[in-house]
Image (tube, rainbow, N blue to C red):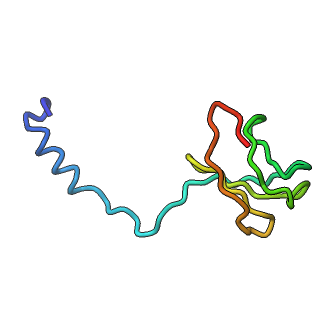
Amino acid sequence: HYRKDTEERGLFSEDRAALLPLPGKRFDVVTWRHMKADRYGVVTLEGRHRYSADRANAGRGVIVGLRALEAEVLDSSGKHLATHPRAYGQAST
């Protein structure tokens, strides 16, 4: 603002007017991983974070969706099995 010899408020108004509108459709920020549950129906991420896929899925392939705050577990056909809070820094079950 000092280089243009004007107030920040005016520059912000110009920038704001030039912004594009947000998309109408929500964008799901997720990384999907195909994994295999262990004999207890648990998947392990990054060698230490454990999430239950239900005992009924022991030894089966599952799909794990990683979001910033949660891990979603689906069976191989895409049916929702569980949603768990993400574990950061400590192991979880």
Identify the image quadrant of residue 47.
top right
Identify the image quadrant of residue 57.
bottom right
Residue 19, position as x, y percentages in the image: 28, 56
Name the residue: 14% across, 34% down.
1
Residue 44, position as x, y percentages in the image: 78, 42
Name the residue: 74% across, 43% down.
93
Name the residue: 86% across, 61% down.
56
Residue 60, position as x, y percentages in the image: 88, 58
Asked if 45 appears above or below 56 in the picture, the reply is above
Asked if 51 appears above or below 74 in the picture, the reply is above
Identify the image quadrant of residue 12.
top left
Name the residue: 36% across, 62% down.
22
Please tell me which residue lies in front, 3 or 93. Answer: 93
72 vs 56, left or right, is left
Please tell me which residue lies in front, 3 or 69. Answer: 69
Residue 86, position as x, y percentages in the image: 62, 44
Please tell me which residue lies in front, 80 or 25. Answer: 80
